[in-house]
Image: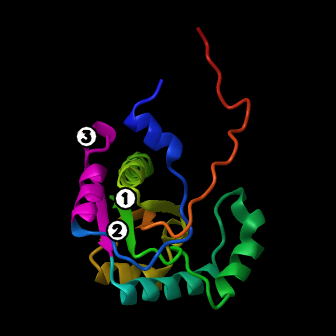
């Protein structure tokens, strides 16, 4: 079975090389409109999407992420990747959003069990909408990892992200500089009980 939605799902790839060209205002509006039409627990729609297109703001965020990753300790088994993450963040050319011209941060109210799920669904809408417009996108974790890093949170508060919001994740969006190949799907990840 195929249709434009299924095609977008199968064709979408994580883009990690973007051109410098900014997305058009109409494209940004479409991405954000797609986000707010995602399902949310109890139809709460308690998320906030903060879109950043200023190169200066993005580079300042990158500086905070580089600093924050030096002392970050994962709260799960991701700790096995910690040395590599710290080393990577120390490199001069490190850029957590892959130099995308647009970064959309998804945050949600605190003490809300569906915060992450709601924002993840909205981000997937962004990724599929981006694909439908031939834009690249990538799911970005670092702001989520550094949710409790005070200097970063202070700066995000200056940008209008509420201090008490949980940073769920972000989407890097822009024009693709390089098309990513489709990795093979792992076997044994689906079970049907009839």
Q: Secondary structure at mark 1?
A: loop
- Determine whether, in the image, residue 58 is placed left or right of residue 28: right
Q: Nearer the viewer, residue 5 or 45?
A: 5
Any magenta on residue 128? no
Name the mark on residue 110. Answer: 1
Question: How far apart are labels 2 and 1 at the CA level?
Answer: 6 Å
Q: Position of residue 111 (x, y in %)?
A: 38, 54
First reached walking from the N terminus: tag 1 or tag 3: 3
Q: Position of residue 21 (x, y in %)?
A: 38, 77
User: Dot 3, crowdedness within 10 Å: few (<14), some or many (≥20)?
Assistant: few
Name the mark on residue 164. Answer: 2
Question: How far apart are labels 1 and 3 at the CA level?
Answer: 16 Å
- Region of the chain picked out in magenta, as a range: 26-52
Question: How far apart are labels 2 and 3 at the CA level?
Answer: 21 Å
Q: Nearer the viewer, residue 134 or 73?
A: 134
- Residue holding disc 3: 43
User: Dot 2, crowdedness within 10 Å: few (<14), some or many (≥20)?
Assistant: few
The residue that appears at 65% across and 66% down in the rendered structure is: 74
């Amino acid at each position: 079975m195929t249709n434009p939605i299924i095609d977008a799902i199968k064709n979408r790839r994580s883009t990690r090389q973007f051109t410098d060209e900014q997305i058009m205002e109409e494209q940004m509006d479409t991405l954000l409109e797609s986000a707010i039409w995602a399902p949310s627990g109890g139809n709460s729609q308690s998320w906030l999407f903060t879109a950043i297109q200023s190169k200066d703001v993005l580079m300042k965020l990158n500086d905070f992420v580089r600093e924050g990753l030096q002392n970050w300790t994962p709260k799960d088994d991701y700790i096995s990747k910690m040395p590599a993450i710290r080393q990577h963040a120390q490199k001069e050319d490190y850029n957590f959003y892959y130099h995308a011209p647009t970064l959309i941060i998804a945050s949600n109210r605190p003490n809300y069990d569906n915060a992450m799920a709601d924002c993840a669904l909205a981000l997937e809408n962004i990724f599929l909408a981006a694909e439908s417009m031939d834009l690249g996108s990538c799911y970005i974790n670092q702001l989520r990892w550094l949710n409790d890093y005070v200097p970063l949170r202070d700066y995000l508060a200056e940008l209008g992200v509420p201090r008490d919001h949980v940073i769920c994740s972000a989407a890097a969006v822009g024009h693709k500089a390089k098309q990513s190949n489709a990795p093979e799907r792992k076997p044994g990840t689906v079970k049907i009980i009839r």
